[in-house]
Amino acid sequence: MKKLILSAVVLFGTMSIQANVLPVPQETKTTVIIQSEYTEVTADAVPAAVKTALQTAYPGAKLEKAFVNEKKEYKLEISVGDQKATVYSDVNGNWLKI
């Protein structure tokens, strides 16, 4: 009988120690960086330098949508054949992100 009680005490003691060792869930914070707001513009409002750079880099590309931010950076949604992509350019036609 003593062995049974001793086994129960050891078992419960082990369980309480294990419960204290388990990690406590931590809060996770996520930081989201929002880029400058882009405003949609017509294809005619896109500078000639940007259009030229687009045709040079992507021959046969069709400009689907164009957006501009206050830094005069252009976000261009293009399609070449059945593929679609978004590219970024400054006002002089230099690629910022492809």
Image (cartoon, rainbow, N blue to C red):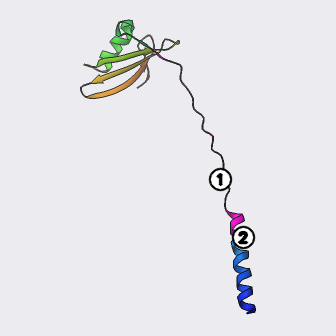
- Residue type at the position of mark 1: Pro
Check disc 2 and give the amino acid type.
Ser
Helix, strand or loop under label 1: loop
Q: Main secondary structure of the magenta part?
A: loop
Looking at the rendered structure, the secondary structure element under dot 2 is helix
State the mark number for residue 16.
2
The residue positioned 71% from the left and 89% from the top of the image is 4
* 2 or 1: tag closer to the N-terminus: 2
Which quadrant would residue 58 be assigned to in this image? top left
Q: Position of residue 94 (x, y in %)?
A: 43, 16
* Image coords of residue 68 (percent x, y): 46, 14
The residues colored magenta run: 18-39
- In the image, residue 38 lies in the stretch drawn in magenta: yes
Residue at 34% of width from left, 16% of height from top?
Answer: 54
Q: Is residue 60 magenta?
A: no
Quadrant in the picture for the N terminus: bottom right
Residue at image position (28%, 20%) is 61
> Residue 18 falls in which quadrant of the image?
bottom right
* CA gap, disc 2 and disc 1: 18 Å
Q: Position of residue 40 (x, y in %)?
A: 43, 14
Tag 1 residue: 25
| Left or right of 42 on screen, residue 33 | right
Q: Is residue 3 above or below residue 26?
A: below
